[in-house]
Amino acid sequence: MSLIGVFDSGVGGLSILDEALRQLPQHDYIYLADSANAPYGEKSPDWIAQRSLSLCKHLAQAGCDAIVVACNTATAEAIKDIRAAIPIAIVGVEPGIKPAAMQSANGIVGVLATEATLNSDKFNSLLSTLPNHCQFIKQAGAGLVPLIEAGKANDGETLELLAKHLEPIQVAGSDTIVLGCTHYPFLRKAIRKLLGDKITLIDTSEAVVKQLKRQLEALALNQTDSANSVSSQYGAVHFFSSKDEQALLKMAQDLMHTDLKNHRVSTALLGNVS
């Protein structure tokens, strides 16, 4: 059993944690939400890089064997520095534009992401490696993250804003949409309501957790003892928030499919992190 840190600017990374608890429920997890500073997508690249590195160092000092940077913006701006500074397994996330290009029937793919992700060198380097025949319609989802953070993923206000952001993607004739922010999988229901069931939605949560699993296996950390009791099939989940730990837990209970009653759950307010 290992201790895995999952870091995000807010509740978006819960989509990654949810998948991790599905694939790897036996491990212990620390979920760290920097909700006091969300959303990251509207902050400067230097601030994002420095804050992300500080929080990942905090997780490493807490004893984490691996860290998932479950934030597309933080991955784009900080993953290189984090890997250079912290000598444990670091798994990042990135928009699933490659699988989207492979799955799109008409070669027109919408990419809904934060402004910071769309402008990052990492994203545009990845984009440059993909076939020219595929057209990517890039759309910043400004204002969506605060609404999701406020528990309004399916409210009328969110539907109205989401419709505006999806309009250029829809007008272009996209048959596939990349959910390029870990918050956006929580908008699946709203997107389906607006665009129907025929459009393909690409969410990389499953792929990210498979990569985490490979990293753990490589480090010989993903070993389970057959003699362990049944209770050890489910590890503990610790929720830390820089704003409101009880609100974070409530959001986890509301948004995640995982039954947290199977896990030992605790919450704490994140103090000052330098």
Image (spheres, rainbow, N blue to C red):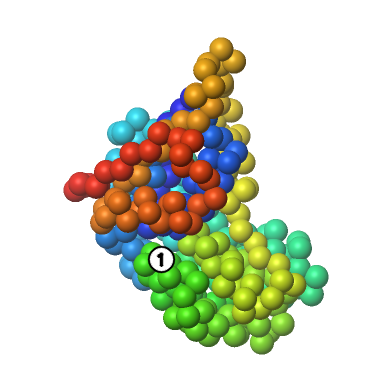
Q: What residue is drawn where x is 59% and y is 68%?
A: 189
Q: Position of residue 87 (x, y in %)?
A: 41, 33
Q: Residue at x 66, y 87 (%)?
A: 171
- Relative to residue 106, is residue 242 depicted above or below? above
Q: Nearer the viewer, residue 171 or 115?
A: 171
Q: Is residue 257 visible?
A: yes
The outermost residue toward the top is: 227
Q: Nearer the viewer, residue 251 or 37?
A: 251
Q: Position of residue 108 (x, y in %)?
A: 72, 75
Residue 55 x %, y %: 31, 47
Callout 1: few (<14), some (14-19), or many (20+) C-alpha neighbours within 10 Å? some
Secondary structure type for disc 1: loop
Coordinates of residue 166 in the picture (x, y in percent): 58, 80
Residue at position x 55%, y 83% from top?
A: 163
Q: Amino acid at mark 1?
A: Gly
Residue 57 visible? The answer is no
Q: Pick out the residue farthest to the right.
A: 105
Q: Which residue is mark 1?
A: 151
Residue 150, picture quadrant: bottom left
Q: Is residue 177 above or below residue 49?
A: below
- Quarter holding residue 38: bottom left
Q: Residue at 59% across / 15% down in the picture?
A: 226
Question: 78 or 155: nearer the eye?
Answer: 155
* Residue farthest toward the front in the current orientation of the protein: 261
Whether residue 24 is situated above or below residue 192 in the rendered picture: above
As drawn, is 27 to the left or to the right of 209? left
Q: How many marks?
A: 1
> Relative to 69, is 22 on the left or the right?
right
Question: In the current view of this chain or complex, which residue is farthest to the left?
Answer: 272
In the picture, measured across the screen, residue 157 lies left or right of residue 257, that is: left
